[in-house]
Amino acid sequence: MNDLIYILDLAGTLVFAISGASTAAEKKFDLFGATVIAFVTAVGGGTLRDMMIGSTPVGWMKDINYLIVIAVAVLLTSFFRKKILKLRRTLFLFDAIGLGLFTVLGLQKTLALGLSPVVAIIMGTVSAVFGGVTRDIITNEVPLIFRKEIYATACILGGTVFWLLQYSIGTNYWNLSIAILLIIVIRILAVVKKWSLPTIS
Amino acid sequence: MNDLIYILDLAGTLVFAISGASTAAEKKFDLFGATVIAFVTAVGGGTLRDMMIGSTPVGWMKDINYLIVIAVAVLLTSFFRKKILKLRRTLFLFDAIGLGLFTVLGLQKTLALGLSPVVAIIMGTVSAVFGGVTRDIITNEVPLIFRKEIYATACILGGTVFWLLQYSIGTNYWNLSIAILLIIVIRILAVVKKWSLPTIS
Amino acid sequence: MNDLIYILDLAGTLVFAISGASTAAEKKFDLFGATVIAFVTAVGGGTLRDMMIGSTPVGWMKDINYLIVIAVAVLLTSFFRKKILKLRRTLFLFDAIGLGLFTVLGLQKTLALGLSPVVAIIMGTVSAVFGGVTRDIITNEVPLIFRKEIYATACILGGTVFWLLQYSIGTNYWNLSIAILLIIVIRILAVVKKWSLPTIS
């Protein structure tokens, strides 16, 4: 189980780093800027989560593989830049996958510290969205989280389902996979079907 | 005493959450966006304070009542939106009350950790203003803290008075109430009388 | 050795605080705004580093001298404002010196916690650049770190040289001085010679 979580965490880091590096490439940042944005997108959410729950030094500092994965993502994006940018949908897909992975992993880590399920769902969502929010602010985009389509709401729904499954039948591969897929599917459908939430007014 | 502090902390959370939700309503954010902004406005300052002084997991995570109060604030704002927005002064008043409450409570918490009074006054001010600064940045307003009127300066003055009272006569209900009222009154007078600080030039 | 590090840390705080206060003076912020910006520029990087590596309460809280140095910087800037602003190169020089000092000191502190050299170089760079990034965001400048010239790259190069020296010949005054000077010189040459990095495209 822990092996699977570790691999999924590296996978989430990879897809978010590619999403960050591609945004930087699109905006013509230099190589250093692209690396910074890939790094911030990939580790920003987990870093804020770890600082808030008091799990320091924060996660990526304790295992060099996270930094290696980010470097690989920047190199991949440099080499296949044209292909990646042509497939803007791919970019969006990477973001959706990262969203699913990081929500569930962040939720899991917060629960493991003994904090309440509602807090865990919030921290899962923070883990998943904060890197992307920072990427959008740095590159001067309107943060995805505040666009009309459903974004963080997908994390909250998927996180809630994950916790309900885990609470009723215990932690296992199926819960994890179902919740991650659910978030990815909601996010994709939200964009394809143009789902949105009502405004407060 | 601790009961009073707890109730004041929940009251500060409520008024800041209403202030955040109302700003979101004014800017036509969707329900999720409004909840995020209410949440960030209410807990942003305390979260940054707790991360800086090393009191983690941060405060609101350990007691579900903070999240409940924020949910209530969002619901109240949804139902009474028109009335709240009509009374723009009410909004400003909520912000001033939150400012007074959070300055004194943040100062108190920092002192209790054994840090120096100057640091405690700074951290009281950070607790009080950072949530609002984040709200203003997210909703694209010029942060209140950098407008011409006296804002954080009110926190610093009130915080200093609180510490002087506490140092000379010990912690009691009166110190707490006097300092909180002082901050609210300075803030209101600053806006009504258009007080401002000299520029550095 | 520890005395030297302490003095260099206060010196870095002074130059960054002057750089922050001068930017504020140029933009006509009031005295409080100038103090906030001087403070954020001077302690922002170290604060983020300390929160991430879990060294809390963060550094400046434990020693009043940091706050005194910042107050002195604001006063100096107020009195000699015209002279400082006339010499815009001085401002740039202060920023370069702070960059060199804080990179090496942040790196050192992270290594001392037992974290890996790559992480230490990243955290040295974060210590050096985050204060300035926040200053630029607050005062609405394009962050220096994302301008075409070499900025954080100077920190990374100097930090790497520092670690190589320390790893091969142990910590001593020379390593420290060489690495700090190297960062300052790279930064100055980068601006004078208009060095830049290739873009990812």
Image (cartoon, coloured by chain):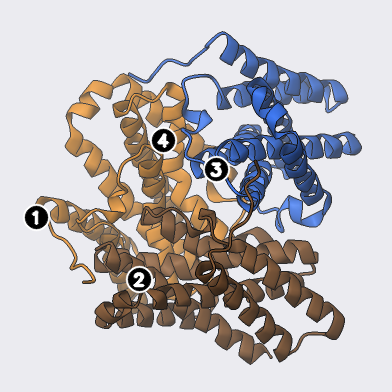
Chain colours: A brown, B blue, C orange
- Mark 4 / mark 1, whichever is N-terminal: 4
| Dot 2 and dot 4 residues touching (CB under 8 Å) | no
Q: CA distance from mark 2 to mark 4?
A: 32 Å
Q: Which mark is residue C193?
A: 1
| Dot 3 and dot 1 residues touching (CB under 8 Å) | no
Residue A113 found in image quarter: bottom right
Residue at screen point 69% across, 61% down: A122
Please give the residue where the numbered disc 3 appears in the rendered image.
Answer: B134
Q: Which mark is residue A42?
A: none
- Label 2 or label 4, whichever lies nearer to me, is 2
**Crowdedness near tag 2: few (<14), some (14–19) or many (≥20) residues, C-alpha within 10 Å:** many
Please give the residue where the numbered disc 2 appears in the rendered image.
Answer: A21
- Residue kind at label 1, given as amino acid type: Lys
Could you tell me which secondary element the residue under label 1 belongs to?
loop
Q: Quadrant of the C terminus of chain C?
A: bottom left
Q: Nearer the viewer, residue B127 or A119?
A: A119
Q: Which mark is residue C38?
A: 4
Q: Are marks 4 and 1 on the same chain?
A: yes
Q: Are marks 2 and 4 on the same chain?
A: no
Query: x, y percentage for residue B46?
Result: 67, 44
Q: Residue furthest top?
A: B193
Residue at screen point 28% across, 62% down: A27
